[in-house]
Image: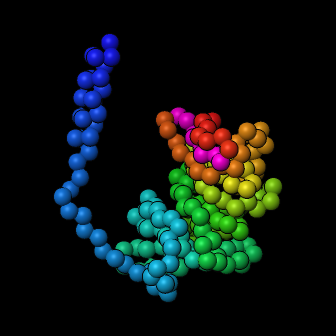
Amino acid sequence: MSRILTPAILSLFYITLSAQTLPDNFFFEQISVPGTIQSAITEDILQDPYGMLWLGKDALYRYNGRDFTKYDMILPDSGLFSTREITRLRWDHARDRLLIGTRNYGIVQYDYKTDKMHKLPSRDGVPIINDITVYNGEIWATSFPSGFFKVVNDTLVRVHNLSDFHQPTRMAIAGNDLWMVCQRCGCCSG
């Protein structure tokens, strides 16, 4: 049986690889973000449905193909992003907004209608956000030191019934499953 399956699996693997051809040459244009050190770290980058590029650096930057716009003030407290504040960028298609994971403000949202950033309230303290995922229309967040969170009525709430997930860091969607990586238990599916 294995003699029959092995060539079949190898053939399928070859077909999959040959279907993923890449162009011979890639062309890159280097664009510097004004007012930042060129060697500064970019934590995350995202292209929204409107074609804008968003960069998480020492602040949030929007690039429209010609110009950069810097966003660093967070309402309602008028807080400012600090160095390496932004950890993750995700687009929420259901609410048409950019979600920004941060080290000191939990989840911040950018709204195109107001052209401003607002901190989402947090019921269980403000966690350091490692990752944000929109799964089945719901917003989930991981915090290495604080656990697993869900956004309920635009408020960040710790999910206590998932206490088996210790020190979660990243999430991924595979088919109909939400997977997360945890320090103690490895990869988990929920």
Residue 12: percent from the left, percent from the top? 27, 30
Quadrant into which the N terminus falls: top left
Q: How is the image coloured?
A: rainbow
Q: Main secondary structure of the magenta part?
A: strand
Range covered by the magenta-colored residues: 176-183
Look at 28% across and 37% down and name the residue there: 16
* Farthest top residue in view: 1
Quadrant into which the C terminus falls: top right
> Which image quarter: residue 74?
bottom right
Based on the picture, tell me whether residue 21 belongs to the magenta stretch: no
Residue 159: percent from the left, percent from the top? 75, 45
> Which image quarter: residue 87?
bottom right
* Farthest left residue in view: 24
* Farthest front residue in view: 3
Look at 80% across and 56% down and name the residue there: 123
Q: Is residue 5 visible?
A: yes
Look at 52% across and 42% down and name the residue there: 173
30 lies above or below 147: below
Residue 82: percent from the left, percent from the top? 64, 78
Q: Is residue 123 left or right of residue 190?
A: right
